[in-house]
Image (cartoon, grey):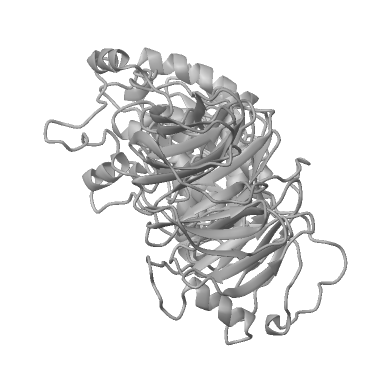
Amino acid sequence: MQPLDDTDPTHIGPYRPTHRLGGGKVGRTYLASDPEASTVVVKVIHPEVAEDPDFHVRFTRESASAKELDSPHTAKVLDADPDADTPWIATEYIDGMSLTEAVRNHGALGSAPLRVLATGLAKALDRLHRHDLVHGDLNPDDVLLVEEGPRLVDFGIGRLATLLPPDPHDLDTEPEPGVSPDVGTGHLVDAHGTPSAPAPVGQPRVEGPAPEEEDEQKSKKPPTGTRTGPTPSGKPPAPRFLHHLAHKAPEQVEGKAGSPASDMFSLATVLVYAATGANPFQGRTDQDTAERLTGPAPDTEDLPILLRTLVAACWNRNPASRPTSAQFLGALTNSEPPPEPPGPAAPRHDPSHETHRTGTFSLPGHENTPTHRRRRAAHSTLERWSTAVRGGHVPPPRFGTLPPCPQGYPAGIAKIGPDGRLVAVASTGAVCLWDTHTGTHLGEFTGFHEQVHDLAFNAEGTLVATAHQNSTVRVWDLAGMRSLGVLSRHHGAVHAVTFAPGGRILASGGQDGTVHLWDLTTGVPATTLTGHTGTVHTIAFSHDGTGLATAGFDRNVCLWHSTGGPAHLLPLRLPEHATVTTVAFGPDDTHLVTGDTTGTVRTWDITTGTVGRAYLAHNDTIGDLRFSADETALITAGMDGNVLVRDAVGHAPVAILRGPRHGVMAVSLTRDGGSVLASGNNGPVLMWRL
């Protein structure tokens, strides 16, 4: 706030300026008093900007629309005069601390106030965008914190503030070349039922423009006067504005007007600043900042999972692929933590004195330590579980039960992500997502009505694939929280999906007895494997990704090269009433381990087809088996309700985890071996954590 001088006006319409608040490329802002002596904020447009006829048309329309806006999260626009010699707009004065001051003086916001901030700003932008308004210059200075929550200010002519001479009238944004429509139909449940945004650029696509369409799009030239790409030197063009540059969107740096999509990019940057106290795009110079904004998006791994996924989606370089304000708000609404139960808190217990602890899946987080193949260190998966069961220095496994999904969907197959932060639960008509560190329900992927038979995470934990009763496979982006599309080549229900090492290839098997290896960069099968005469219900890749094993209800186990070619039929010698239900490659890729309907685990030599070891592991069908990432432990799950942890070499039992009485159909574990997730058929989803 600065005192007035001789260059400042004495009156602006009916308002009398008392202090100068600041100035920008579009105009100056004053603190003023109205005829009733109430304090208001008035922005006066610079004459050289106001002289542009297109500016006058847009200012007239947007100031009128802004006056109609009534939101508890924005400053109310009181009056405006587009036809004055010096046009102006007046808004209510809000006596609050800016987000910039709050972070600078008191540090980054904690999780609870951060959620309040994100929700308030999303509601403010949603109301703006529904009135065809754009802020265009969202930054921490324009966010005021008051007792009732955050308030967004300085939005009446925000879109105009992003444009400078020589093109202040270039207000309409041309469609981005190469933007494909969304090929998926699924979306997170949101407060307004808004469909999900298109699939993000840079992620594996399941569909896209044909080559001839791409050539045609590449030949299109941007509109005259618009800079949309790098300069001949290969660097992004010099920014056309300097004010709050680090909070702009990449397309604004390249000379385009502010839009609802650019507001969402800026919202993510503001939230990261509030959560960390720093803006990752801020460089030492404007050119450095512009290069950061138009380069790869910053890493978001250190952010809370909900904020991380939303920020990653908003920071998509393709404006059309960012979530809308309604979708952003819907994701926040769906992730509200459940209310605390009434009554006093339960007394604390020393977990070292408990065998199991039952609860509502709100187990505290733990540090994930990367593991390596064949690692035999003291903290290997096997030794961690062995120490836990024998009552050593590591506390015994703790046990939690995932609550039912809020929408009432019965639980089916569930898997835990490789880093242990996310659980996906497949069901009829939905895939429900949970944050394991907080017990927060993050929402559902929907858009289908049939049963989901299987699901799988990729190795990075950024994608989930689901197998559906209606002959399709769907791929979901966890960073953008949206559908990447639908894969349709099977004839009959799909019962198995799994990603190959590297994540580019997705394998699916189904009722038609075929296995498709989908190339996710093109969305078409790279290879189709035929050899089964019955439903394929399990698929496993070798550790190096060159081999593939499949099992079907025809009682056959087939071995394939992942590039195709004829199948090698493993000469099984099973009891006549036994069928292989699950397979996994052994640590050295020379053996195959199977589980079957008799509860027996068998180890097969891939070259000769002979059985090296066989033992009764469960008293009923084995639903699933898999090795830990460090290959020290073998985990099996059975319809007898048990999950067993064994030595991967000698198969000696190490731990028995008691599951539901009606059985366990699927088991998954985190990369560090610190958590195991078990799920059944419409039963509870269980998790054990060291």
Residue at 62%, 59% (x, y): give it: 600
Q: Nearer the viewer, residue 541 or 55?
A: 541
Q: Is residue 221 above or below residue 239?
A: above
The answer to whether 330 appears left or right of 408 in the picture is left
- The picture places residue 429, in percent across and down from the top left corner, at 69, 33
Q: Nearer the viewer, residue 25 or 102?
A: 102
Q: Is residue 31 visible?
A: no
Residue at the extreme bottom: 392
Q: Where residue 626 sits in the image (x, y, percent)?
A: 53, 58
Query: Is residue 121 in view from this perspective?
Result: yes
Query: Is 557 drawn above or below residue 273 in the view shown?
Result: above
In the image, residue 255 sits, relative to residue 670, either above or below, namely above
Quarter of the image containing the C terminus? bottom right
Identified at 74% across, 72% down, the residue is 357
Q: Residue furthest left?
A: 233
Residue placed most toward the observer, 385 or 152: 385
Q: Quadrant of residue 469?
A: top right
Residue at left 36%, top 32%?
521
Q: Position of residue 488 (x, y in %)?
A: 51, 24
- Say which quarter of the image contains residue 389: bottom right
- The tally of labels here is 0
Residue 177 position in % (x across, y down): 33, 20
Q: Say above or below: 278 vs 266.
A: below
Viewer-side residue, 35 vs 64: 64
